[in-house]
Amino acid sequence: MTWPPGQHPLQRWHGSPLSHRLAALLLAVFALVATVSGTASAIVLRDSLHQDLDNQLIDLAEGTRTAALDHKISVTGDNKWLLSTDDLYVGFFDQSVPTAPGQPKLPDPLPADGFSTTVLATGGQGSGYRMRALPMGDGRSVVVAAPTSQTMLASQEVSYVAGMSGLLSLVALAFIGTFVVRRELRPLERVATLADTAAGGDFTSRMDLTALPPGTEVGRLGTALNGMLDELQGALAARDASQSRLRQFAADASHELRTPLQSIRGYAELRLSGAMPDGRDVDEAMERITAEVKRMTRLTEELLLLARFDEQQEAEFEPVDLGRLVADACRDAAAVEPGRPIEVRVCGELPVLGDEMQLSRLVVNLLGNVRMHTPPSTPVEVTARLETGRVGPRAVLIVRDHGAGIPAEALPHVFDRFYRVDRSRSRASGGSGLGLAIVAAVVDAHHGSITVEAPAAGGTLVTVRLPALRESEPEAACAGAGLETAAAAASLAPDVRGPAAQ
């Protein structure tokens, strides 16, 4: 038989709600158990009553045979019932012979000694009979029979009572079971509703787990669903934030590259139009073009560096002395700005596992940020030391300047790409806005941390912490090493400590 799509009984069954299927299965199992138990009870009762009736027939047959052998009763009438009442039949037979309608029908052959059998009445009238035969020893047998109407009536009554009680129990179970199943599955319905809501794009709803024990299946399902929605919502938020940053990054990069390109185009058009007949003007235009090209080159290199950091590929690190990199960077900074007071304090060797070029870029960018945003006479304090904490030894780099500082509302954004605190200095002296973003990327690649603070006394305090390869030294050794390093820096660059050191 061909069923229309979706109309096959199994498809309709599997497509029905779980509460309906559980209730139907519960009722079916109960009906099956009630039917089997009722039928078994009726059969056991019938067999028990038949056994009692058989015992009576045995006693009657043995008594009749004993009386016949003792000639206490007359046995002259053969092959007929000597006693036939509604409740008892007794006779002597040597073979199966026809009996009157309504009387027990003799089987052919007669029942063997020790066995009882159930026979019907001749002509099919009345109920059945239990019959037993006992041999006399002369070829004849004493045959006794009794009707089973009372036995059948008792069995029917038991079956009726069992059937009615089972039916009433089934009706009661239908209401109670449906209520209990729906109540127990109500949390699962809430899970399904929450899943539908999430499928519709709303990831803010959550399962209320206060009424769900964590050890139950539905409780674990609700906990897992809430965790999945948290992860999904976080992933979507991260994706949206990433897309937003990408769009902002593309817009900022385009904006940064557009200005030097426009300058180069303007000078080129002036040269081609003949507006620069003087060789000095041409030389000045070429210098400006070269400067813009260098700025674009530096910007693209910084963008490529950040892109490599974004790929999150583990670099092959090697031991690096961060103290040496800090001292070298401070010497270079003193050579660039001889008039800036720089106080350097490096506490011995600071071995870290990392990339020397990236770590050097980190220190140079921090000092360049100070040079970019503070006047040349602003003092700078650079400290590099080891510290021991709960997470193990750390190399700490602190750069403190005493300039104007960073506004509190700008602190959370200083590591954003192309972010500038002072928009008015964006191109004249404000840099590309990628210096601190590169610093943050380097720190993250080396599994460290970086913080920027605006101390109450003014200025800016930047603290970088990187995993170190050894424990910190005693305070006295650290102080001595710092003085030696500062003196070495002053000997190589006399103005490294500035007027304050002289």
Image (cartoon, helix red, strand yellow):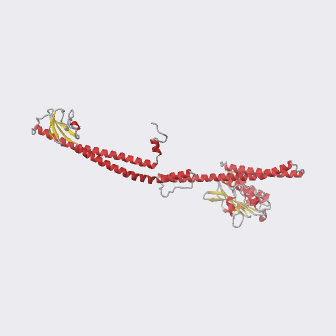
Q: How many marks?
A: 0
In the image, residue 54 sits, relative to residue 286, either above or below, namely above
Residue 487 x, y percent position in the rendering: 75, 60
In this rendering, does residue 356 appear at all? no
Please identify the quadrant where the C terminus is shown. Answer: bottom right
For the point 39% across and 51% down, the residue is 174
Residue 171 vs residue 56, the one in the foreground:
171
Q: Is residue 132 left or right of residue 464?
A: left
For the point 69% across and 52% down, the residue is 247
Residue 454 vs residue 426, the one in the foreground:
426
Q: Is residue 9 left or right of residue 392?
A: left
Can you name the residue that lies furthest to the right here? 278
Residue 350 in which image quadrant = bottom right
Residue 183 in which image quadrant = bottom left
Residue 364 x, y percent position in the rendering: 74, 55
Residue 381 x, y percent position in the rendering: 73, 62
